[in-house]
Image: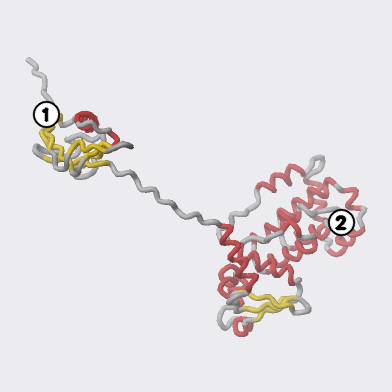
């Protein structure tokens, strides 16, 4: 004869660790005084969710206003067996404390960039002098920032490496002070304000600086900005610069532009002069023409626009 197995029960006590209060707008009522003891009997495998509902309902308190604790805060899915509750153990009940809302101060990247740009423009605390152009126009900078952001300056200012490390003066003769200033602005702030206002000559000068000082992200910025000023009159110079500095994105865009305006470009005197000074671009154009014979490069240019590598981990 089979006998049904009766589930095991466990007796325990629920103790109010503090006054349990029903709170409203008009007044508050103490429903359970601190240290009140309430005897309970539960099956060992029964979920505590039933205890939580019963206790709060019996004492006239909202369920969500209470938390129950044994060795740790009890979860509704826990059971006496899962938390190793034994006979005559005590469960504590407390008012649930609303989580503290911490207002995190907002940090604006723009404020940081503005501060760094102001540091560059003011020259406060600078310890490096750059003499730029034939007139030796003076620009001031900070050794720590230059060496941290640019490996060429880091090598230049390494103790005992070069004269600049001793005297703190850098001569840059073949570039305009304005574009050297733009390069320094990028080193300080990782951006160049009013990049879209630079003309073709300025962009090529800045592109050259970015190549000489190994500032790859600045080089990419110049390549992208160039597409907005590219024209029949300057494509030769841009294509020559792209060839010289291995600016793949700029070269691709120039070739796409060339395919769309071939007749106008080959009739342009300035383009013919660039071909004479930089013969390699003629071969580049010939290869592109062969590769894309019968199709437009416009989709290629658009695709390249979307895939510029601006996620360099060094910047």
In terms of depth relative to the viewer, which is nearer, 56 or 40?
56
Local SS, label 2: loop
Residue annotated with mark 1: 8
Q: Position of residue 94 (x, y in %)?
A: 22, 42
C-alpha span from label 1 to label 2 = 93 Å
Kindly indicate the quadrant of the structure image that contains residue 211. Answer: bottom right
The image's mark for residue 233 is 2
Q: Residue at x 56, y 73 (%)?
A: 144
Q: Image height check: is 99 above or below 212? A: above
Q: Residue at x 20, y 37 (%)?
A: 82
| Residue 186 as seen in the image, left or right of residue 80 | right
Q: Residue at x 62, y 72 (%)?
A: 152
In terms of depth relative to the viewer, which is nearer, 78 or 205?
78
Q: Position of residue 103 (x, y in %)?
A: 43, 51
Q: Position of residue 104 (x, y in %)?
A: 45, 53
Quadrant in which the C terminus appears: bottom right
Task: Report the residue that reaches farthest toward the top.
Answer: 1
| Residue 87 as seen in the image, left or right of residue 270 | left
Number of numbered markers: 2
């Amino acid at each position: 004869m089979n006998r049904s197995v009766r589930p095991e029960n466990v007796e325990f006590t629920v103790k109010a660790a503090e006054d349990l209060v029903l709170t409203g707008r008009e007044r508050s009522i103490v429903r359970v005084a601190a240290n009140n003891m309430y005897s309970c009997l539960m099956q060992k495998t029964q979920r505590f969710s039933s205890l939580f509902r019963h206790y709060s309902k019996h004492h006239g308190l909202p369920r969500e206003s209470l938390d129950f604790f044994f060795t740790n805060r009890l979860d509704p899915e826990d059971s006496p067996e899962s938390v190793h509750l034994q006979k005559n153990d005590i469960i504590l009940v407390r008012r649930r404390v609303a989580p503290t809302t911490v207002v995190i101060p907002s940090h604006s990247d723009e404020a940081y960039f503005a501060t760094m740009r102001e540091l560059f423009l003011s020259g406060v605390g600078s310890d490096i002098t750059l003499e730029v152009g034939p007139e030796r126009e003076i620009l001031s900078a900070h050794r720590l920032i230059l060496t941290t952001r640019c490996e060429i300056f880091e090598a230049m200012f390494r103790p005992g490496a070069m004269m600049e490390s001793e005297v703190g003066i850098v001569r840059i003769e073949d570039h305009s002070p304005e574009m050297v200033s733009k390069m320094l602005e990028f080193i300080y702030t990782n951006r160049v304000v009013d990049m879209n206002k630079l003309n073709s000559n300025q962009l090529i000068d800045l592109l050259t600086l970015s190549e000489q000082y190994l500032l790859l992200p600045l080089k990419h910025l110049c390549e992208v900005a160039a597409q907005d000023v590219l024209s029949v009159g300057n494509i030769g110079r841009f294509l020559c610069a792209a060839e010289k500095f291995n600016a793949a994105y700029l070269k691709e865009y120039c070739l796409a532009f060339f395919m769309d305006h071939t007749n106008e470009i080959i009739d342009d005197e300035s383009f013919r002069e660039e071909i004479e000074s930089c013969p390699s671009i003629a071969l580049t154009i010939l290869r592109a023409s062969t590769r894309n014979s019968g199709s437009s490069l416009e989709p290629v240019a658009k695709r390249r626009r979307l895939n510029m590598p601006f996620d360099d981990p060094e910047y």
